Image (cartoon, rainbow, N blue to C red):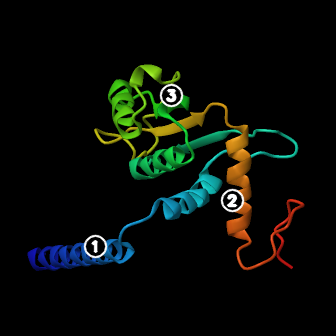
Amino acid sequence: MQRLDTAHTAFREDRDAERRRLTREATQEIGEISDRELFLIGVGPYWAEGSKDKEYARRESLTFINSDPRMIQVYVRRLGLLGVDHHRMRCSLHIHDSADISEATRFWSEITGVPAEDSLKPGIRIDNPGTNHLNRGDTYRGCLRIYVTNRARLYRQVEGRWRRISTSGSTPATDGTSGIV
């Protein structure tokens, strides 16, 4: 049995080394990212994760929620490129009640640069200890929702940019359709 455990450990170490090597190579392959590239890159994640306007429910607002600190950092950097100052950002934590809410608030404040005392009331979910959540423990910090004030114009610009990106290579439509024939 010891030999099997040793082989499994060696396999796992080799796999982890390969994962780190590939990640490092991919990171180096990208190189530096210009403000324009960051600006364009940020449209896709917003359109995937952010709030969107619907004909039946007008919500021309910039609201983004995510649990990945790097995704939040990229979003905040992109907001800066749009001319959004920290004082226009309202952050609210969405987290289970079993977590350290004050620590999570401090963590997200450091990530965003938005003072913790300016945070909106957190959305706290009652934790059911019977469920098998993997998002518990010292590193669990919930999700952060960032809401931008005075945002309708910015929302319309983001929507227009996403339309252009998503129809790249085709004639852009002006009627809200994809423009792809």
At 40% across and 47% down in the image, what residue appears?
69
Disc 2 marks which residue? 161
Q: Position of residue 104 (x, y in %)?
A: 37, 32
Dividing the picture into quarters, in which one does residue 63 lie?
top right
Q: Is residue 88 something one can see in this rendering?
A: yes
Disc 3 marks which residue? 87
- Mark 2 to mark 1 CA distance (whole Å): 31 Å
At 52% across and 62% down in the image, what residue appears?
36
Dividing the picture into quarters, in which one does residue 135 lie?
top left
Q: Amino acid at mark 1?
A: Arg
Q: Secondary structure at mark 1?
A: helix
Q: Position of residue 70 (x, y in %)?
A: 40, 52
- Mark 2 to mark 3 CA distance (whole Å): 25 Å
Q: Earlier in the sequence, mark 2 or mark 1?
A: 1
Q: Earlier in the sequence, mark 2 or mark 3?
A: 3
Left or right: 85 in relation to 172 = left
Q: Nearer the viewer, mark 3 or mark 1?
A: 3
Q: Secondary structure at mark 3?
A: helix
At 69% across and 38% down in the image, what residue appears?
61
Q: Amino acid at mark 3?
A: His
